[in-house]
Amino acid sequence: MKVRVFTADSMQSAIAQAKSALGRDAIILHTRKFRKGGLLGFFSKEEVEVTAAVDTSIATIPPQKAEPCVEEVAVQSELASMRSLLEKVISKIPPGSEHSSVLDLLMNNDIDIQIAEQIINDLPMDYTNFDVESPELKQLLITQIQTCFKSVEGIKIPEQGRKIAAFFGPTGVGKTTTIAKLAAKFAIQEGYQIALITADTYRISAVEQLKTYSDIMGIPIHVVYAADELKAVLDSNQDKQLILIDTAGRSPHNDEQLDELTKLLHIDDVIEKYLVLSATTKYKDALDIVKKFSICMPHKVIFTKIDETRNIGTIVNLLYQFPISLSYVTNGQNVPDDIELVDINRLTPLILRDL
Ligand SMILES: Nc1nc2c(ncn2[C@@H]2O[C@H](COP(=O)(O)OP(=O)(O)OP(=O)(O)O)[C@@H](O)[C@H]2O)c(=O)[nH]1
Ligand SMILES: [Mg+2]
């Protein structure tokens, strides 16, 4: 303990001196007043004496750090993991807000994030010079997307011989309607000799559906129940320049049905196989469909119902994933009008409709 005595002309001033010399923890041990100077007791001045002390042992003990409680530990660890997560997320965002705006635009059009990144990375020039909503940037993206369209070909009927085309895919995508549109185009508008075959004996009224079109157009129709019957009908229609085969819609997850379909379609190697897909299909489902139906070895793909969706990025996503040859797109229920050969210049602006 350290003890010191302080004198001043007032109690306040003496205590202030003590605190200033010994610190805020100083304690006052004793005070007394006394008179100083003067002559024979006259003219003397009253003074105050303060005895103060400070415990030096307290001052030298290092302050104890309180042990954190369980809740504090949990909060600290939570904060640490949030910080590390945030750092990871930030590290993945490429620098520049232009990049994320263009990425958003592509993703708003249903283009998968990884494919959108690829499209942006492959742009031949610095897109950051352009305003995100500028027509120049839109054109740059469209031109880049067009590079994924490898080949487009519709049904080509040879001068000599015939063409046999079969249509297959998931249920309800528009196979039968598309066949009716193509039958009208080739038979009525272009005057070819054609025949229809339906192998869809699975769904009640499926035969009736195609028969109604064949009756209106005056085109012969055959119904087949098995692969060998198909072979026989193809053999008996040698005089036809085009034969269109309808099949029952199949789930991509039913392997037994897909095997049966594959056998039917491979009864004759000359059959040109068209996978029919709806443009309204979610990308992940479309991926499954293309993977599963690849067992049937499609030559070309038809996208239907592009009138029913605002975002047809699924088409771009698939083209970036698979070396698909395109043929037709359909854009409505009207037979025969709502079908056209894929025109890249007309289709790609639709893909970026929301730009
Ligand atoms: N909006 C729109 N509807 C279409 C288009 N193509 C077909 N449809 C309609 O889709 C529905 C199903 O058409 P279908 O031709 O019967 O389909 P499908 O693939 O043959 O069906 P399943 O044989 O049952 O597998 C019908 O209502 C058609 O009118 C199109 O391009 N746009
Ligand atoms: Mg059908």
Image: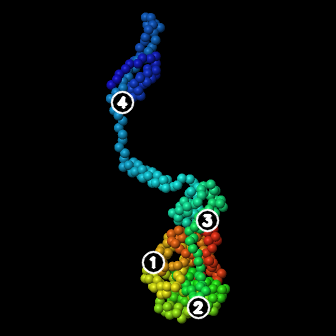
Q: Nearer the viewer, mark 3 or mark 1?
A: 3
Mark 1 lies within 8 Å of ligand 1 (Cβ measured): no
Q: Nearer the viewer, mark 2 or mark 4?
A: 2
* Helix, strand or loop under label 1: loop
For the residues labelled 3 and 1, the Cα–Cα distance comes to 36 Å
Name the residue that disc number 3 marks. Answer: 143
Residue at 64%, 70% (x, y): give it.
345
* Relative image position of residue 286 (x, y in whole percent): 51, 73
- First in sequence: mark 3 vs mark 1: 3
Name the residue that disc number 1 marks. Answer: 253
* Relative image position of residue 194 (x, y in whole percent): 60, 89
Residue 52, above or below 227: above
* Helix, strand or loop under label 3: helix
Residue 65, above or below 28: below
- First in sequence: mark 1 vs mark 2: 2
Residue density around tag 3, few if under 14, some if 14–19, many if 20 or more, within 10 Å: some
Work out whether residue 130 or residue 1 is closer to the camera in this orientation and state it.
130
Name the residue that disc number 4 marks. Answer: 59
Residue density around tag 2, few if under 14, some if 14–19, many if 20 or more, within 10 Å: some
- First in sequence: mark 4 vs mark 3: 4
